Amino acid sequence: MNREYVTKKVSVVVPNYNYGPYLGERLNSIINQTYPIYELIILDDLSTDNSVSIINTYLDEHPNLNARLIINKKNSGSPFKQWRKGFEEAKGDFIWIAEADDVSSPYFLENVMRGFNNPDVVISYCDSNRIDENGNITATSCKDWMLAASDTHWNKDYTITGEEEIKSGLSIMNTIPNVSAVVFKQNPKIPTLLEESLKYQISGDWIFYAKLLQTGKIAYCSKSLNYFRKHTGSLSTDVKKFTEVNEVLEIQKIIRDEWPLNSYEIHRQSFRYGGLLDQMSEKDVKLLRQKTAKSIAWIIPSPIKGSGGIRTIIENANSLVKKGYQVDIYIEEDFENTSASMTNKIERYYGKCLCQVFMGIALRQPYDLIFATYSLQADYINHLEAPRKAYFIQDFEPWFEPRGGLYLQMENTYRNNFEGISIGRWLTHKINSEFGMNMHYFNFCANTSIYRPLKDVEKENAVCFIFQPEKPRRCAGIGISALKIVQKMRPDTKIYLYGSESKINPVPIPKNMKNLKIISPKECNELYNKCTVGLCLSSSNPSRIPFEMMAAGLPVVDLYLENNLYDMPDSSISLAEPTPEAIATAIIKILDDRTKQRRMSLAGAKFMADYPIDKGFDEFGKIVDDIMADKNSDKLTKSPKFYQTPPIKASQEAIDIALTTTTPTPVPIAPTNSFVKLLVKSKRNITTKYKDLVKRIFNI
C-alpha cells in the first residue's frame, strides 16, 4: 500500500459474546489489514462458550500483537456498554469497532481511513456484503436496505457535513447498518453520547451516529469491504415489530427536534415505518400513531408580492415545520404555475419556504389538521374529511364586500365548527362574541433582529405611509388626502410611500410624494429609522406594520376604529378619527413636538422588545399543539380595550386646509352619438362572450 496513509493510530475494539466459532476468522481479518493497526482490544462480555479459551490461544500464537483481552466480571446486557468501554480503553486516535462475528476485507482500513484526510470527518465507513452463519454471501451490498431514503445517495464515494447526511438518510432510518463497517475519530464526548444509546434495544447505534454527526463530517466509501453476518433469529431480525417501530418513531422525533428538516424531509420519515404499521394490530397502531409526525394542510390564496397576510401565513407555517410538523400548502389553480414554479414565487416574495407547495386544492393525502385562511374557502373545507379543522383569520373579511348575500355568506363561515386562530385580541373577541366560534389568539410580534433602532441613520422630517391602493382596507385615498393636508400645513415635510407595485392606481400620487413601491424588510427598517412618523391605516384588523414600526422606534398614526383598540398601546401609537383632517392633525402633533417623538419612540421600542417574532411563533405553535392533542387550550372570551386614550380629532386649521386641497372636480358630461353607443355595446358583448369562452375552456 501507499505508505503516505500510515500516519494515523487505529485502535481495533472487538466486542464478543459467545461468538467463539467466528473469532479466528475475525481476528485474522484484522491482523491481515494492509493498513497497520496500533492496538487490538478484545472485550469479552462474560461469554458462556469457549470464546475466552480461543482468544487466549490466538494471542499466545501471535505474541508480537499489541493486544489485550478484557473480560467483564458481569455480563453488561448491552452491546453499547461494550462500545463505550472500548472507546474509554482505546489509546489510538481512531477506533474501529470490529464486531466478533463479522469479517473484513484486508483492504478495509486502507480505504476507509482515507476519509480522515479531511480533518473535519468524524465517521468514515463503507458499504457491506451480507453473509449468513456459514459465511455464504447473501448480498454484495446493503444499498437495497436504504431504498426508503435514496436509490442514488450511496452509489459513489462522498464526504459531506453531518447535517447533509442526516437529511439524506439518517433522519429517515439507520443508513449505517453495521458498525463493523465504520471507523470513528476518537472524541472525549463519545462515552457520554453512548449513554443515549443505552435506552434502546435495537436502534442505539442509529442515535449514536446521529448525535456524533453534530460534531463533524462523514466520509463514505462505496466499495463493499465489510462482511456483515446476519443470524437467523437474531435480535435484529426477530424482534417484535412494535418495539422496532416504537424506537424508530422516538429517534425520528429526536432528529426532528434537533435538526432543521423541511416538510418533505419530515414526510419522508414515514417511508421507514409506513409498511410496518400496516402489519400491526389496530391497538398497536393507535399507540404508535401518537408518536408519528403530524400532518397539516393550509389552503391559501394565490400569493401577491408585498402581501403581509400571505407572509404571515408562510412564516407561521414554517414555524410549524420547525416544530416537527409535516406542513403542506395548497393554492387554488391559476392555470399558469406549477407546484415548483409557485414554490419559487413564494420564496422570491417572502423568503425560504419549508413547506411543500401544491397547485390545486385537491388534497394529496389525509391530514391531521386542515387550515382555512380566507372565508370563501371555509365552506369547501367544511366538507373535507379531516379529524381537525381550523380557521386562520387575519381580517374580518365580510367587510370587504357590500352588505348583501356574499357578505352574509362570508359571515356564515364563522359559524362552522372550526377552531379559530387570530393574530391579536380584537378579531378573537369579535368572532367569539358575535358568532360563537372557539377562538384563540397569539400576539402581534415583530422580527426585532430586522426591525430595530439604528444609530447610523440620519433622521428626516418625514412621514412614511404604507400605500396599497389595490387593497381598499388600506384606505389609500384617505391617507393621500391626509398627507396633502400635512404638506400644506408643514411644507418642509417629506412624504415616502411604499408597499405596492400595482400598475392600476385609482389614487393619484402627488408629484412631491416619493413612491418607493415594494421594498425589502431591511429597507423598511431603514425607512422607519429615518422618518419621524409612520402612517398605517388599518380598517379591518390591526396590520403587523404598526408593530414593526414601533420595534424600529417609529411613532405611529392609525385609525381610531374598534379593530385597533384591543391590541395597540397608546404610549407609542396615536389613533385618529377616520377623516383626512383628523389623521393630518395626529401627524402634525408628532411632527411639531420633539419631546413627544422621543417619548413615543422609546415606548414603542420598549413595548416591542417583549414581543419578538419567535414569541408569536411559540404562542401559535402551542395553540396548534393543543388542537392536535384535542386539549381545551385557553380561549379568549372577554378582552378589555387596550387603547384607552380618546381619538385625535381634526384641528380647525386642518379642516380649513382640507377645503383647499380636497375640492372635488365635477365630471363633465360629454354627448354620445349613436355610433359611439354601438361601439360600446359591441365591446361589452365581445367581452362577455370572451369571458364565457375562457370559463368553458378552463372549466372555471
Image (cartoon, grey):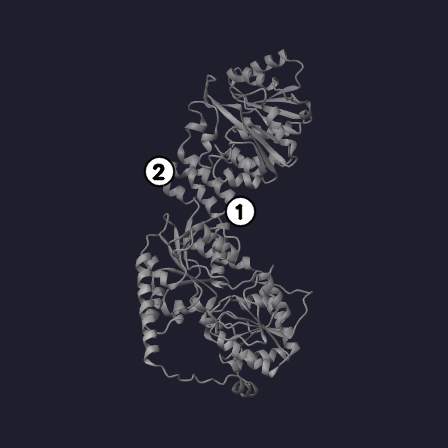
Of labels 1 and 2, earlier in sequence is 1
Could you say where residue 692 lies in the image, as x and y percent from the top left? 31, 63
Could you say where residue 250 lies in the image, as x and y percent from the top left? 47, 41
Image position of 389 with respect to 254: above or below: below
* Amino acid bearing label 2: Asp
> Can residue 13 be seen here?
no
> Can residue 232 be seen here?
yes
- On the rendered image, what quadrant is the C terminus found in? bottom left
Q: Which quadrant of the structure image shows residue 182?
A: top right
Q: Which quadrant of the structure image shows residue 378?
A: bottom left
Disc sitting over residue 260 in the figure = 1
Disc sitting over residue 278 in the figure = 2
* Amino acid bearing label 1: Pro
Q: Of the residues tagged 1 and 2, which is closer to the observer?
A: 1
Could you say where residue 282 lies in the image, as x and y percent from the top left? 33, 40
Could you say where residue 373 lies in the image, as x and y percent from the top left? 41, 60
Toward the viewer: 466 or 105? 466
SS type, badge 1 = loop
